[in-house]
Image (cartoon, rainbow, N blue to C red):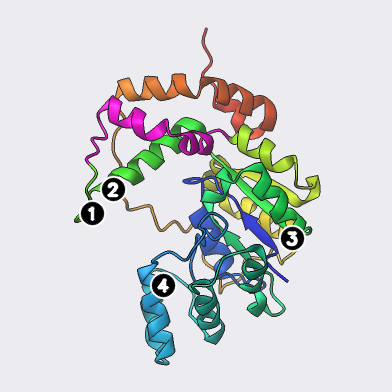
Amino acid sequence: MGPDFVCIGAPKAGTGWLFDQLSWHPDVWMPPVKELRYLKARKPERRPRLRKLQRQLEKGRYSKASREREIDHLRPVTERDLEFIKRFLSEEKRNLKRYGELFEMKGNQITGDITPLYSTLDSRSIVKLMEEFPKLKIIYLIREPVSRAWSHIQMHKRQTEKPNHRANFDIGNLNHVKRFICQSDMLLRSCPSRVADRWRTVVPENQFYYSFFDDIISDPASVLKDICNFLGVSQEISEQMLPPTFNRKDSRSKYPMTPEIKAYLEQLFRDERAISAERFGGAAKAWTPHHP
């Protein structure tokens, strides 16, 4: 028992798209919330939206909760979602055994955890995870380092604009950007070669799959079919599923990158771009600027 797969990221590389697609797949049961973060958080987090959903379901308001979720194109909820939420928000000490028990209600479907934060798991944690779940499949979505970093910086800017947020972050200020992106875990998230090396040292080759954000943008249907094939579920895109082109984040505001910040990020990730082009091939070959 336990998850059949874990998507480890990268953050801002299409993990939300994958969660949406698999949530509506008839052969897959995804938890009612993306990013469990269970393997990184030692105790339950606040998760106010999930706790609100729990209260609704405990009162039997499944139809009302499902209608509210429909606005965001989220699948309807059922009794097994309530059981999952109760276990997930439990105050009990977290460990891999209890992590596996979260997924007991999957039935005949496959299930998994999509948490980009897992790209920063240390080697010891990865070893323990694979020892507990030796057949676990790992999915890694890769994005060009500079664009990934800038997308994450923009997300941080949007978060600091929320009411009562104390952080002062000027997205056009190079020093502010440096302080944010040069945190060790943040740098790791933009270094796909380092993340992949850490996981592939432990995970059997036939249980590790990676794809490029570039390909999700250019041909999402093909990437989805590849992932379904890797997971061993139907590759047919049925009418009950979301269109592969669906992207809930299309309407979000974008911040322009100043030439100074662009030059800094390109220099910061210059070596990673080159290593990734050699290591992964495919779309990564186009990441490195060609100079005459």
Point 67% across, 42% down: residue = 123
The residue under label 2 is 158
Residue 50's mark? 4
Q: Nearer the viewer, residue 247 or 54?
A: 54
Point 43% across, 86% down: residue = 57
Tell me if mark 4 has few (under 14), some (14-19) or many (20+) residues whose alpha carbon lies within 10 angstroms of its own.
some
* Residue furthest left as drawn: 163
- Sequence-first tag of 2 and 4: 4
Reply above or below: 202 against 231: above
The residue under label 3 is 132
Give yes or no for contact between labels 3 and 2 (Cβ–Cβ under 8 Å): no
The residue under label 1 is 162
- Residue 267, given in percent of the width and then of the height, sits at 45, 19
CA gap between label 2 and label 4 equals 21 Å
Task: Tell me which amino acid carries mark 1.
Answer: Lys
Tell me if mark 1 has few (under 14), some (14-19) or many (20+) residues whose alpha carbon lies within 10 angstroms of its own.
few
| Residue 187 on the magenta segment | yes
Task: Tell me which amino acid carries mark 2.
Answer: Arg
Which portion, as a residue range, is magenta?
Answer: 168-191
Eye-nearest disc, 2 or 4: 4
CA gap between label 3 and label 4 equals 27 Å
CA gap between label 1 and label 3 equals 39 Å
Say whether residue 229 is visible. no
